[in-house]
Image: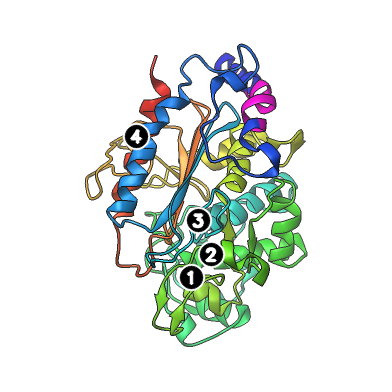
Amino acid sequence: MTAGRAGSVSRRRLLRGGLAAAALASGRYAGRTVAASDAPAGAGPRSSRPEGLEAVDAIVRAAVVARAFPGGVLAVGLGGALVHLRAFGRLTYDAGSSDVATDTIYDLASLTKVVVTTTLSMILVDLGKLDLEARVHDFFPAFAGPAKEQVTVRHLLTHSGGVQWWAPLYKEVKGKAAYLERIVAMDLAYEPGAKSVYSDLGVILLGDILERLGGVPFEDMARRLVLGPLETRDTLYRPGPSLLERVAPTEYDPWRGRLVRGEVHDENAFALGGVAPHAGLFGTAPDLAHLAEMLLDGGSFGGRRLVSRSTVELFTERAGVPGSSRALGWDTAADESGQRSSVPGQPGYSSAGSLTSARSFGHTGFTGTSMWMDPERDLYFILLTNRVHPTRDNEKIREVRSQVADAVVRALDRP
């Protein structure tokens, strides 16, 4: 462990008793910045200026006014503590809509891939059950043909296996067995390892591999090995009727003929029964903060180790796929070129902005969700929105994400 990293861990242990406790006062999430004065003397990093996050709040408020999304929740953590938690806007654009609360539950979309599927992969690697170099063909003998027998678990995690990225299978089949049969039969779109093309279908294959190796249903494994140990309160698949009022609606879906609320927005995940390795998880920003804190603490949370430090580092560093910023499951802030931009469409654009460190890792979700961790700063920031309400055609979130990222770093990096 480097001296800087050791210092970061030491600060984290101190801060948990002060800032984090204040942020979670009275069993409910305080919608405020936690002042440095709430922490034990000497606990806060010298560069920590959480009050500077008012500029970040202004960006999110402006995005609500510009109708980038009806509302959202921003969480920022530093030194192992949740130091800033804010709710903005309303659940919908309807005049009578409820305000967003800091514990509003969002459809996390593809954050499911990292919160559940990637974390389960880490755990099974540590347990010696998952071999990253295992061939997909060994689990699915019918996955054969030109180059298909070269595809490994590592390829699935880095979206570099050549598996087609998506198909509207929900229009044709239902249930996991039918989905797997169709995906396994597809030809590859490109040579394995040649590049990275984001693939929902590859992650669906990965999820079934994990389920077989874990020996229990995927949802149960997620709850027992990830969501439970992380002490999440409201992060789950298929939220029940008692939680519906707290769930932010997503899209008016022409395929389903209704406003989607409390059921997964992703059509393929819906056809899979609402539980899938690529989408389907619902959750809150404070719950996701637990995952971020675990990863930044090298795999430990609440005094319990979930993942080894070496496995966290392996999964969160750029995997070396040509022209790709992908890590194992996670994304990173830049590819091998090192180009950085906060402007969508420009070379080097990332939702992590242009100021986070090269070691930063994170992910986004189609519904308007994102989370990023910066190990060099011991910093994380999470933005949950329902930008697909009332339609997925609204893509203003792309600018907002990078603006928020840059503003967080500027606020907390000041001398």
Give the crowd class for mark 4: few <14, some 14-19, many >=20 residues within 10 Å: some
Image location (x, y in percent) of residue 15: 64, 24
The crowd level at tag 3 (other Cα within 10 Å; few <14, some 14-19, many 20+) is many
Residue found 39% across the figure and 29% down from its top: 409
Q: Which amino acid does label 1 sit on?
A: His
Which secondary structure, mark 2?
loop
* Disc 3 from disc 4: Cα separation: 31 Å
User: Farthest residue toward the top?
Assistant: 42
Residue 197 percent across, percent down from the top left: 38, 59
The residue that disc 3 covers is: 155
Mark 3 / mark 1, whichever is N-terminal: 3
Q: Quadrant of residue 290?
A: top right
Say which residue appears at 60% left-offset and 11% top-offset. 42
Q: Point out the residue furthest to the left here.
A: 346
Q: Taking 341 as reference, is 241 above or below it?
A: below
Q: What scheme was used to colour the molecule?
A: rainbow
Amino acid at pointer 3 = His
The numbered dot on residue 377 is none
Where does label 4 land, which residue?
Answer: 406
The amino acid type, in three-letter code, at marker 2 is Ala
